[in-house]
Image: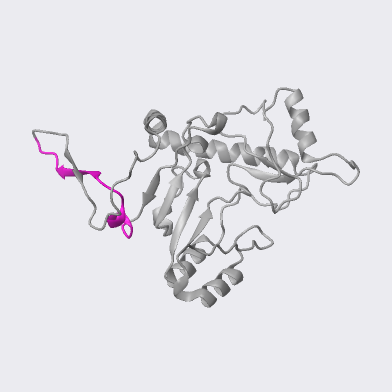
Amino acid sequence: GFEVIELPSDDKGDVDLDALRTVCKEKGPEIAGMMITVPSTLGLFEAHILDVIEIVHEAGGLMYMDGANMNALMGQVKPGELGFDVMHYNLHKTFSTPHGGGGPGSGPVGVGEKLKPFLPGPIVEIVEEPTEEDYAPGYGLKMPEKSIGRMKAFFGNFGMMVRAYAYIRVYGGEGLRDVSRHAVLNANYIRAQLMDTYKVPYPRYCGHEFVLEGHFEDAEGVHALDISKRLMDFGFHPPTNYFPLIVPEALLIEPTETETKDDL
């Protein structure tokens, strides 16, 4: 098995680069890789992400991006161009699929050229380029060169992938870009409205979500959960409570792109 090493954040909410360098120096070639969420669960885009990727790659490790927060990045950032080797998407958080009642969840995985030969197979590839007479290419099944083999079951939940694909096709490239722009704008709008009332542990422009501390010195006994319950009394969906764990009485607010200014 692998040993998991948790890295601390610095005072701005980014990865502590000194701690990362120390781990990579001590472990050296034992480093298999690093997983990081971009933007982070604090809603912050990692300011030193290129440095993080370079440090891990120099140690011989791979970079895995948790794409849970791609709703902030669609059409803005290509993870592969940042240097990530592998990532997954959370279809329920970005591409409209349901996630109630414990599922059905789906997290498609994408890889760069370095890992492409190891993908489970068979995979669909273009085997015949389109001609002047036939505008459609020819497709076929192919086993990657160093494939880990076939999966026992299908590669995930097919129904969720169809729904996510339909969502992507309906919006198109520019539409998805606008989705992320509005998600980020809405989150920053609420953050600006609340920052004089609540403590904002990391007062920076955020991505599609941000974190507040849900406790007040002059309101002893009132907790983040109480605030969320009270919002529900007025018919509003409450924010996530007590996560991320590094923020006391955390209120994680993610308005999404579809809320109106009046609702916000």
The total of numbered circles placed on residues is: 0
Q: Considering depth in this image, is 193 or 245 the residue closer to the camera?
A: 245
Q: Is residue 118 magenta?
A: yes
Task: State the image coordinates of residue 243 (x, y, percent, origin top left).
Answer: 67, 46
Task: State the image coordinates of residue 195 (x, y, percent, origin top left).
Answer: 75, 44
Q: In which quadrant of the rendered image does the C terminus lie?
A: top right
Q: Is residue 77 left or right of residue 245?
A: left
Q: Is residue 87 magenta?
A: no
Q: Considering depth in this image, is 66 or 74 the residue closer to the camera?
A: 66
Please give the name of the residue rendered at 24% of the width and 53% of the height, measured from the top-left corner. 144
- The part of the image, by quadrant, that contains residue 250 is top right
Image height of 118 relative to 135, above or below: below
Which residue is outermost to the left? Answer: 133
Task: State the image coordinates of residue 13 (x, y, percent, origin top left).
Answer: 65, 57
Task: State the image coordinates of residue 20 (x, y, percent, origin top left).
Answer: 56, 69
Q: How is the image coloured?
A: one colour
Q: Considering depth in this image, is 213 or 102 the residue closer to the camera?
A: 102
Please give the name of the residue rendered at 17% of the width and 34% of the height, measured from the top-left corner. 136
Image height of 259 relative to 242, above or below: above
Q: Is residue 51 left or right of residue 156?
A: right
Q: Is residue 170 left or right of residue 214?
A: left
Please give the name of the residue rendered at 53% of the width and 44% of the height, measured from the top-left corner. 69
Please give the name of the residue rendered at 65% of the width and 44% of the height, measured from the top-left corner. 210
Residue extent of the magenta highlight: 113-132
